[in-house]
Amino acid sequence: MHEFSICGLLLKALTEEYDAIEPAPAGLKSVTIVIGELHQIVPDYLQGAWAALTADTDYGGAELILEFQASHGICPACDWTGTISPPLFVCPTCKIPGVELSAGKELFIRKIEIKT
Ligand SMILES: [Zn+2]
């Protein structure tokens, strides 16, 4: 259940942003996060972690919106780019293993909606 630790990181980042908002918001409406598919998140577990960890906080009842980012890679040999399926980072064109990851490990907050 690494969703709880991811949710903990998310809350830490969220709190830094939220506390910096002037004037202080009346509450949090929603937070939108972007997660690369390599994190292998189970959306229901993350929603459960979010509900459990925010229940008695200023963020209780706020919606957690998830946007998933597919894994993309680039081949250093032939410059192929495209969607890759972990754990096999093999170039479909020249068949070398060693396609470099260009997307799929994201974990960041895209948007915060507050109550005023
Ligand atoms: Zn290649």
Image (cartoon, helix red, strand yellow):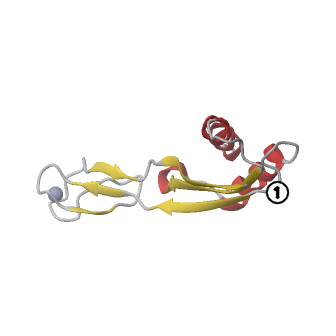
Q: Where is residue 24 shown, x and y percent of the image? A: 71, 41
Ligand 1's quadrant is bottom left
48 sits to left or right of 37: right
18 sits to left or right of 86: right
Q: Where is residue 79 shown, x and y percent of the image? A: 14, 57
Three-letter residue code for mark 1: Gly
Residue at the image point whose x is 73% and y is 55% from the top:
116
Mark 1, other Cα within 10 Å: few <14 / some 14–19 / many ≥20:
some
> Which residue is most to the left?
78
Report how many numbered discs are placed on residues in the image: 1
Q: Where is residue 83 shown, x and y percent of the image? A: 34, 64
Residue at the image point whose x is 73% and y is 52% from the top:
28
**Front residue of 82 and 62:** 62
> Which residue is most to the front?
23
Q: Where is residue 66 shown, x and y percent of the image? A: 60, 61
Which of the 4 image quadrants contains residue 32? Answer: bottom right
25 sits to left or right of 39: right
**Front residue of 46 and 75:** 46
Above or below residue 44? Residue 9 is: above
**Front residue of 14 and 10:** 14
Question: What SS does tag 1 mark?
Answer: loop
Quickly name the residue at label 1.
61
**Front residue of 103 and 94:** 103
Residue at the image point whose x is 32% and y is 49% from the top:
101
Say if disc 1 is inside 8 Å of ligand 1: no
Above or below residue 22? Residue 64 is: below
> Which residue is most to the right?
56
Tell me the quarter of the image containing the N terminus: top right
Residue at the image point whose x is 14% and y is 60% from the top:
94
